[in-house]
Image (cartoon, grey):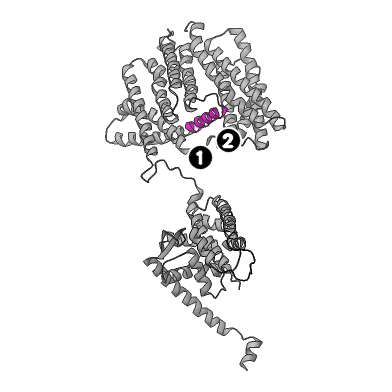
Amino acid sequence: MSDQNANDGGQPRFGRPRSEPTEPAEPAEHVVLEEQIDLWRGYVQRRRAISAADVDEMEDHLRGQVSDLTASGLEDEEAFLVAVKRMGNLDEVSREFAREHSDRLWKQLVLVPEEPGDGGRWRELAVVLALAVGAGIVLKVLLAATVGNELVLVRNGVFAVLPFLAGYFVWKRHVPWRVSALLVAITTAFALVVNLYPFEPGEFDGAGMTEFLAITHTPVVLWLLLGVVYAGGAWRSGARRMDFVRFTGELIIYLALIALGGMLLIGLTFGTLSLVGVDFGPVFADWLLPFCLPGALLVGAWLVEAKKNVVENIAPVLTRVFTPLTIVMLVAIFVVLLVNGPLTDVDRDLLILMDAILVLVLFLLLYSISARDPLAPPGIFDWMQLALVGAALAVDAVALTAMLTRIAEFGFTANKVAALGLNLVLLVHLAWAAWLATGFVRGRRSFGAIEHWQTQYLPVYAIWASIVVITFGPIFAFA
Amino acid sequence: MHIDKDLVAASATPLVLGILADGESYGYAILKRVNELSGGRMEWTDGMLYPLLHRLERLEYVKATWGTSDVGRRRKHYAITASGREALAERRQQWAVVSDALKQVWQDVQPGPAVAEGWA
């Protein structure tokens, strides 16, 4: 810059006699020019088809042009405007760059940088893989120790794997040791409850109702505890909770993709080895499963963390696709339930299916909220969401009426109460969300209220799941 | 003079390759050279030069290196490659054919009144 200033200062100015002294004016003019060029850089850099290196190249051009124009007698500002005009319409230039560099319009996720020097990424990958192997070893040991007693394996599988995923986030988020210690204590307490309760065996020596409920609800508690670790201990923050929601949604999708790829790979391996008479089954069951399942979870989590800000979230896109379809499904179910009533033959399965439907609706609601600009005004999709929740509540009301009638007639069981309880928890969540959404689309409430309600309500699921795990055994005599 | 954009586009590649055949250069200098060669009558949209240079780089007709200008700015220099020279020779032959054809067309065109009068 100083060279440029000296160079410009040395040039005589033609066509403009000046009475004022030269020295004080120069720096001010160049300051304005620098500001103008900075603004221009920012403007150009917003075009995805034009890379930072391209902007450097064009800036060199622009400055050269400005320099020549000022040498021929123009003031800085005039020279800048002429030079920018000669660069051409930015839309057209950008389109030409896009034609030549179309790959830039697709965002690429760089997992591990190729340049040496960024050791952080490699270290993180090493930590992830080490934790994955650790989880695999623990699961393998558990598998060997529980031969012939599959219920012990099923009860403890989640305790073998989730602590390693938590370890990844403890390391990554520098979680305070007090928070970690408390979470370890809570997790240990749940492990003791699940393993020490004298559950009665069910049919064919399988799990009884209360044991089954404990097995299915423990992962819910542990996952929401993982949310505390994910938030770096700041679990009271609504923004951190929503981040955990986003993470969970993307993780499910990445795990589904990894599972599909894994199945393809294993299928090809089975097929090829069977042609030469080798049975791949034992290797698969004894070694691949114990190591690949936790491995997929750890690697999936790492991928989701790596992709933040680089690749768009998929979950909210899927909600856009499935919200209208689900509305149609719910309306159809509602009509069929009414036409085919009274629901004399419905049983517990209906209530469980209703719970599943409400969970689906909750996910659709949650993930579209997680990606919505809170300051945008209500639009057609917000009305569609309101219709979705309304339809779900209507269907649930019909099913619930029938279910309550049957419970009153035939009495309570652990499964019925658990299904009913979850239904009520979901009902409260969705009903209040519908109330807030109505206020929002009518312009009486802010979107922030809806978002806040979602994150505020999350602990209720952990509390309900904990109640099921801890109290249903004693209440229902461990049957 | 306004020159049709299709003609500008068609002539851009041989012009840039020809200028680089004279020696290594950079974007702004190339543009100034085009201006000189045309006697100021070809005015390119400056920004369009760079996607073209990148395309020539992708085709390996030119090689690019980042250097520093005499006032300390980052500057990308371009040099023609062997395959670039081959491409230039090929374009030259193509233009020679077109030029010959056009020359005959110009000669066959019925001379206008002014020209005829001039000859008389």
User: Tag 2 or tag 1, which sits nearer the N-term?
Assistant: 1
Q: Considering depth in this image, is A161 or A335 the residue closer to the camera?
A: A161
* Badge 1 and badge 2 in a common chain: yes
Residue type of the residue flagged with mark 1: Asn
Residue at x 64%, y 64% (from the top left corner)? A20
Is any atom of residue A59 visible in this view? yes
> Mark 1 touching mark 2, by CB under 8 A?
no
Query: At which x and y percent is residue A431?
Result: 65, 23
Main SS of the magenta part reads: helix
Query: At which x and y percent is residue A242?
Result: 55, 29
**Quick check: B4 above or below A230?**
below
Question: Which stretch did the figure color magenta?
Answer: A238-252
Disc 1 is placed on an element classified as: loop
Gap in Å between the C-alphas at discs 1 and 2? 12 Å
- Return the residue at label 1: A309
**Residue A219: in magenta span:** no
Residue at x 60%, y 10% (from the top left corner)? A407
Q: Considering depth in this image, is A85 or A407 the residue closer to the camera?
A: A85
**Which image quadrant for residue A123?**
top left
Q: Considering depth in this image, is B16 or A273 the residue closer to the camera?
A: B16
